[in-house]
Image: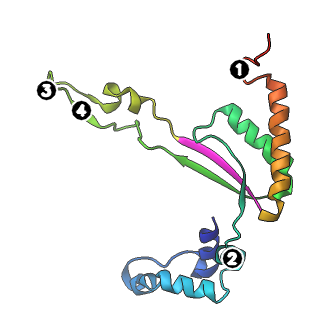
Amino acid sequence: MHLRGALEELLPNRQFPSPSGEHLKEFLAWDDWKVLGFLSNGHGGEHATRLACRDHYRLAYGSPEISSEADLCLVENIKKELGDLVVAEEESAKSWYKTGRPDIPVVSDVDPGTVLPLSKYSHVVLNMKANNQILLYVRPELAEKANDIVRGVLEHERNQQGTFGFASGTS
């Protein structure tokens, strides 16, 4: 997030020049050395300063990579309680294997005339789910306060939900 934020400050119109045609040389000029030069000279705003000083935002809470509706509701509750402490919210949504159309066709070893989608042969592929993780970040100086708030929300959730479906150990 900090590199993206710094580059948005540095790049003309907040994006790289087109990597083709008359803009190709301009695009190629944006190499590591040019960016590092800008960063070392104090350009790039708050995000560049955080990169240079290794003072990055701290993760206050992150949902599981494959979040259920309950996980996403918990994120919303935590975000509400953290309020203005949240300075960045990052979403990770990615599918490692897309079983949509077209799926990878696989020819049967037994009957070469039979062609079925890979997901019909592989339960692992069939059950792969897309990531839908949400990460909440806070400024480093507020990380401890945020941790206390998150712990409080999680404790409240545990009390509301009982034991999250597990035996409490008492009879």
| 126 to 54, vertically: above or below | above
Amino acid bearing label 4: Val
Judge from the rendering whether residue 131 lies leftward or rightward of residue 158; answer left or right: left
Amino acid bearing label 2: Cys
Is 142 in front, or is 94?
142
Q: Which residue is mark 4?
A: 106
Q: Residue at x 70, y 38 (%)?
A: 72
- Closer to the N terminus: mark 4 or mark 2? 2
Between label 2 and label 3, give the one nearer the viewer. Answer: 2
* C-alpha distance separating marks 1 and 3: 48 Å
- Closer to the N terminus: mark 1 or mark 2? 2
Looking at this rendering, what residue extends furthest in the top direction? Answer: 171
- Closer to the N terminus: mark 1 or mark 3? 3
Q: Secondary structure at mark 1?
A: loop
Q: Which residue is mark 2?
A: 53
Is 90 in front, or is 26?
90
Between label 4 and label 2, give the one nearer the viewer. Answer: 2
Residue 158 lies within the magenta run: no
- Magenta part of the chain: 131-139
| Residue 112: numbered disc | 3
Q: Indicate the position of residue 86 as horizontal and vertical percent values.
A: 78, 56
- Closer to the N terminus: mark 3 or mark 4? 4
Task: Mark 1 and mark 3 in contact? Answer it, CB < 8 Å.
Answer: no
